[in-house]
Image (cartoon, grey):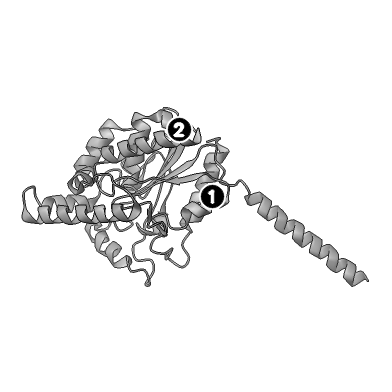
Amino acid sequence: MNRTFAGRVLAVLFFCFCSFGAAAQTGYTQTKNPIVLVHGLLGFDSVLGVYDYWYGIGGELKSGGAKVYTASVSASNYSEVRGEQLIRDLDNLRAVTGKQKFNLIGHSHGGPTIRYVASVRPDLVASVTVLGSPNTGAPMADLLSTTLPPGSAGRTFLAGFVNALSAFLGGLSGNTDPQNALGALASLSTSGSNSFNSRHPQGKPTSSCGSGANLVNGVRYYSLSGTSVLTNIFDVSDPLMGAGSLVFGFEQNDGLVGRCSSHWGTVLRDDYSWNHLDEVNQFLGLRGLFSSSPSSVLRAQANRLKTLGL
């Protein structure tokens, strides 16, 4: 009898513990303003509705109560053009949801894209979180601009190929926005980024590898990134990241973006064991065995925004 009673007590305690844990997670990511995920260069929202750019991340955020939308803008174009496309979509979301502001999270070229929106339409934005974004330019863009000068056959071929690939990805994801590979190249170069930053400086670091203002015009600014390159031998995209890292020399990078270039606003962390694609859980969620989960990191960011009333 005593053993039976003790067993029942333990069962009730275990049930209560599990219920408390589930309750503690309920609403963990339930921000006041919806979260909008914005893809980078050669990105998409979802291919044929079955494979997401933000692989598994949207679902994880939603599981904690967040309202999450994935933007669909040009796979390749100027930062400003992509930003205007995003403004169009946010205005539409305003009309549909009744929400006035949004928490924007942008990966890679999605970073400058959402920064543009926050700069010219702060009334639409509650917070900006840039993830692995080349805020001061991407060395690969500089290399391509130098080795393939304007008017060269190589530049024409590359632009045609990237435009075709961008249009193909757009077709698979239902996006009909125009593509402009050379526009993207110009925006992502060091000179293009510096020019962009002079026009849209909100959150700009006060030193070459430091942090910037967290709150500008009512918008909170955050950044985070990785500094690993070859992270999983089963990831078919790792060789591409390895090749991209060669242009950085001894500078820490994620394969496409330097550690300091990723800084903007409050730097949450800049040395996750991720490469550029790991940051959005690609490819198929493969990453380093002991690396942090991008989904968990962005859940924590959503909770941070929730705590701030955003």
Rate crowding at label 1 as few (under 14), some (14 to 19) or many (20 or more) other CA atoms within 10 Å.
Answer: some
Query: Residue at point 52% right, 36% down?
Result: 310
Is 190 situated left or right of 228 in this image? Answer: left
Q: Which residue is at a point 75% across and 60% down the rendered structure image?
A: 15
**Along the horizontal axis of the image, is 240 left or right of 29?**
left
Residue 293 image position (x, y, % from top left): 48, 58
Q: Which residue is mark 1?
A: 62
Expressed as whole percent of the image width and height from the top left, the position of residue 100 reads 47, 31
Q: Nearer the viewer, mark 1 or mark 2?
A: 2
The circle drawn on residue 95 is 2
**Residue 37 sits above or below residue 123 on the image:** below
Observer-nearest of 245 and 97: 97
Instruction: Check the picture and name the quadrant holding the N terminus.
Output: bottom right
Corner quadrant of residue 168 = bottom left
Rendered view: 33 above or below 176: above
Q: Amino acid at mark 2?
A: Ala
